[in-house]
Amino acid sequence: MKKTLLFILFHFFVINVDAQNESKAQINNSLDAWHKAAAEANYKNYFDALTDDAVFIGTDATENWAKPAFEAFAKPYFDKGKAWSFTALERHIYFSQDKKTAWFDELLDTQMKICRGSGVLVFINNQWKIKHYVLSMTIPNDNIDEVIKTKTPIEDALISDLKNKKK
């Protein structure tokens, strides 16, 4: 009886680990293909990788795009034949208990040097789709003060506007 129970538990664990590894591979492939679609200016493949209600948050504080607005913003870049080129250097993937939602963070090699991407994917119709993506520029800690000096005049005005909107 004990051997049977151990056998069942072992196989359940192995199957669960295999399924998670397969999902991670699918997500890695999906995200790599998404980044490749941008590099190749493949508008259809790029935006098909997003859910209909996806959100893309860019590096500028004003960039919080629902999918239709992001499509409109990005279309001219894709139409010129060159959008942007991001290649994952490192990626970490995590799953909800039901394995239908995943979130990740990644370091990217970009034209802006190293950036960080993070997001949420959902499993829909047997494929992983990006529901939420955040792109951030990384700033070396030793250079924070000079970056703050550059940002201050631009973002002080934005901070004021945002605070006034809350009132």
Image (tube, rainbow, N blue to C red):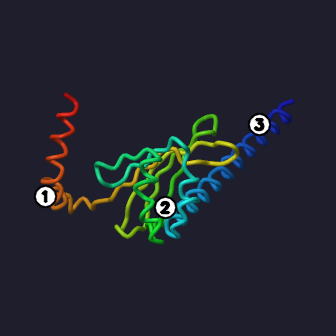
**Element at label 1:** helix
- Residue under numbered circle 2: 90
Comes first in the chain, label 2 or label 1: 2
Q: The residue tagged with tag 2: helix, strand or loop?
A: strand
Residue located 47% across and 65% down the image: 78
Instruction: Choose the circle earlier in sequence order: 2 or 3.
Output: 3
Q: Which quadrant of the view contains residue 97?
A: top right
Answer yes or no: do the residues labelled 1 and 3 have beta carbons within 8 Å?
Answer: no
Amino acid at pointer 2? Glu
Q: Mark 1 = which residue?
A: 149
Direction from residue 24 to residue 148 in the image, left or right:
left
Q: Amino acid at mark 1?
A: Lys
**What residue would you read off at disc 3?**
9
The residue sitting at the top extreme is 167
Residue 17: x and y in percent read 69, 46
Q: Position of residue 124 (x, y in %)?
A: 65, 42
Residue 66, position as x, y percentages in the image: 43, 44
Between the C-alphas of marks 2 and 1, the distance is 30 Å
